[in-house]
Image (cartoon, rainbow, N blue to C red):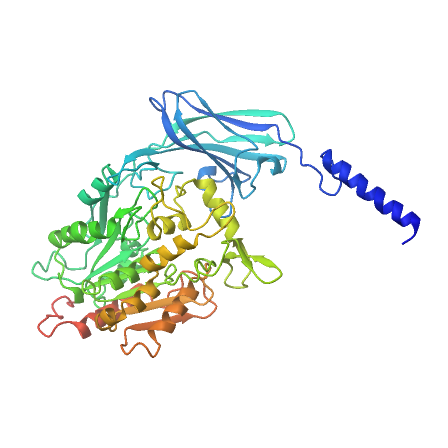
């Protein structure tokens, strides 16, 4: 190196050091702080007294629907901030200190014309029976959807030119109160009812309800002495009829349901929203409460009292997809003497070695896979057709954090932590990992394993469960599931078909190159398969013909 090169090298280091100290590093220019801010308030005419909750601001370029109805995993731009004891007229500020998603900071919002709307999500104070006091969103029979929950308050949509580098203070008032949910009326075919659960109400210190939507078979009224097998469908909250049945000439399933070939079932869709999510996963947990007991000791007995079902295990079947896939499988495993078989589609992680890409036992961080000399982002969502990554784990969890802190997002990973995880000191669940850093808590991971890892549970209790589950487990999954849920099914199959297992308990079927939601049957085909299963496994003295009338 020449003297000139040495001097030039020294000068460059000196310049970079000085500019870094002065905050003007030319290699990493400082991003100007934004002067754009939003001040959001609620008038006394919209609510009386102070409120506690979370304020959302939605920013979108699309005009077709209200911004609040556009919110999804990937878009539009969303900001959220908690507030406590908000008085009428008092303002909540959203600025560059407020975490957002997909863009994390308001200062990075591209200058443009946008449609803007605010939504106030109300929280309720719960004095739980375990001594903890928590603030959560109380479901209003909408399925934990803050953008349409009755009692929440939203603003008019504003069309604005936004530029983070300009000094703008935009004031928005939330003035419109979302009205109560309209429950569809009963028909000849579809019945709905709702009960207050004494167990859950005691746990939460607040009235908690369970419900059911019942689809009756053709001829139910004309055959008053016939009892029917029951199919329990589990999944996300919905007030629609099972299988989206409608007495409508345009509804294809209607003609299947009334056809002579269709087996006569009573089909039940259960509603069990919680303060954490749109369903409880139908099991007991320290954070959610005794939903498993409430469903099996309060709701199902009421169903069997009101409707002519066969009250025996061989005639109680389960099905569901995704969330409902996990629930239907877990209920069959946890209650092997109560149900006669499950058909579970694309189930949520049945083995926690892959929780939407995260191996909770081996990974040290939920956001990255660490290798000897490098790390790569953990994928969360992919396109089945190409394998292209749509979301990383970090992005997915940032989205949940924007929707709500302390597990109050109403989103997928938060409800898994609420159901599968231990109780935290503050009364909310103890998280599996930090949503800001991704660091995994190994003690929490072990709690998940010991309590809710279904593959591990089966293996640990196999001597007792194996004989009770013969021919009862039917699983279906696309090999390119959007959320990598097929991996957990592979782990489960590996155990159930191993030499350790002398019992034929399971049937697996995969869709090559298929994603989340793949289904090899039409609804009528699935019902035919289930009817044959009941006939084959019914007790010798059971009448399996009287409910098969034409």
Look at 34% across and 22% down and name the residue there: 49
Q: Which of the pair 382/368 is nearer the observer?
A: 368
Q: Is 508 or 524 nearer to us in this picture?
A: 508
> Residue 544: x and y, percent?
13, 70
Asked whether, in this view, residue 21 is left or right of residue 445, the answer is right
Q: Give the image quarter of residue 20.
A: top right
107, above or below 451, in the image: above
Can residue 190 be seen at all in this image of the molecule?
Answer: no
Tell me the quarter of the image containing the N terminus.
Answer: bottom right
Quadrant position of residue 260: bottom left
Q: Quadrant of residue 522?
A: bottom left
Task: Please state which of residues 423 and 314 is positioned toward the viewer in this rendering.
Answer: 423
Q: Is 283 placed above or below 464 here?
A: above
Image quarter where the C terminus lies is bottom left
Q: Is residue 10 above or below residue 349?
A: above
Image: 95 above or below 276? above
Q: Residue at x 48, y 48 (%)?
A: 397
Give how far across and how far down residue 99 sits, in percent: 52, 38
Asked if one can make out residue 142 in the rendered structure from this viewpoint, the answer is yes
Q: Residue at x 64, y 31 (%)?
A: 33
Residue 486: give x, y in percent of width and height.
42, 65
* Residue 323 image point, x, y percent: 35, 55
Q: How many marks?
A: 0
């Amino acid at each position: 190196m020449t003297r000139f090169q040495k001097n030039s090298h020294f000068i460059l280091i000196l310049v970079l050091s000085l500019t870094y100290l002065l905050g003007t590093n030319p290699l990493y220019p400082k991003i100007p702080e934004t002067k754009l801010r939003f001040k959001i308030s609620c008038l006394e005419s919209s609510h009386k007294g102070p409120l506690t909750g979370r304020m959302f601001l939605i920013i979108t370029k699309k005009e077709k629907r209200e911004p609040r109805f556009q919110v999804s995993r990937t878009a539009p731009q969303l900001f959220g901030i908690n507030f406590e004891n908000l008085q009428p007229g008092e303002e909540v500020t959203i600025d560059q200190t407020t975490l957002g998603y997909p863009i994390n900071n308001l200062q990075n919002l591209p200058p443009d014309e946008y449609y803007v709307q605010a939504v106030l999500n109300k929280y309720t104070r719960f004095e739980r029976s375990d001594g903890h006091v928590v603030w959560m969103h109380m479901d209003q029979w909408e399925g934990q959807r803050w953008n349409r929950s009755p009692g929440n308050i939203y603003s008019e949509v504003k069309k604005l030119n936004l530029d983070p580098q300009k000094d703008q203070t935009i004031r928005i008032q939330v003035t419109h109160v979302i009205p109560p949910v309209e429950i569809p009326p009963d028909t000849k075919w579809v019945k709905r009812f709702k009960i207050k659960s004494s167990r859950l109400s005691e746990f939460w210190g607040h009235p908690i309800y369970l419900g059911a939507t019942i689809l009756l078979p053709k001829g139910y009224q004309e055959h008053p002495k016939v009892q029917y097998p029951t199919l329990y469908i589990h999944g996300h909250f919905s007030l629609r009829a099972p299988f989206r049945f409608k007495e409508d000439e345009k509804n294809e399933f209607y003609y299947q349901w009334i056809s002579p070939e269709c087996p006569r079932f009573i089909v039940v869709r259960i509603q069990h929203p919680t303060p954490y999510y749109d369903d409880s996963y139908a099991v007991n947990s320290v954070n959610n409460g005794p939903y498993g007991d409430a469903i099996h000791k309060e709701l199902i007995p009421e169903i069997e009292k009101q409707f002519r079902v066969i009250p025996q295990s061989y005639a109680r079947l389960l099905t569901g997809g995704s969330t409902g896939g996990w629930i239907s499988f877990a209920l069959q495993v946890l209650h092997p003497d109560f149900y006669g078989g499950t058909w579970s589609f694309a189930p949520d992680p049945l083995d926690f070695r892959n929780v939407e890409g995260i191996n909770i036992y081996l990974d040290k961080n939920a956001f990255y896979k660490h290798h000897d000399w490098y790390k790569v982002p953990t994928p969360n969502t992919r396109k089945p057709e190409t394998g292209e990554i749509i979301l990383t784990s970090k992005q997915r969890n940032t989205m949940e954090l924007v929707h709500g802190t302390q597990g109050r997002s109403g989103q997928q990973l938060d409800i898994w932590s609420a159901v599968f995880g231990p109780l935290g000191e503050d009364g909310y669940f103890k998280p599996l990992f930090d949503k800001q850093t991704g660091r995994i808590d190994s003690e929490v991971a072990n709690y998940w394993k010991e309590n809710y890892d279904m593959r591990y549970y089966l293996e640990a209790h196999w001597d007792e469960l194996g004989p009770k589950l013969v021919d009862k487990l039917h699983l279906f999954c696309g090999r390119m599931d959007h959320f990598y849920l097929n991996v957990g099914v592979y782990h489960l199959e590996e155990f159930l078909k191993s030499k350790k297992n002398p019992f034929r308990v399971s049937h697996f079927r995969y869709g090559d190159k298929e994603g989340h939601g793949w289904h090899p049957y039409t609804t009528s085909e699935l019902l035919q398969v289930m009817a044959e299963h009941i006939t084959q496994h019914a007790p010798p003295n059971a009448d399996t013909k009287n409910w098969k009338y034409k």
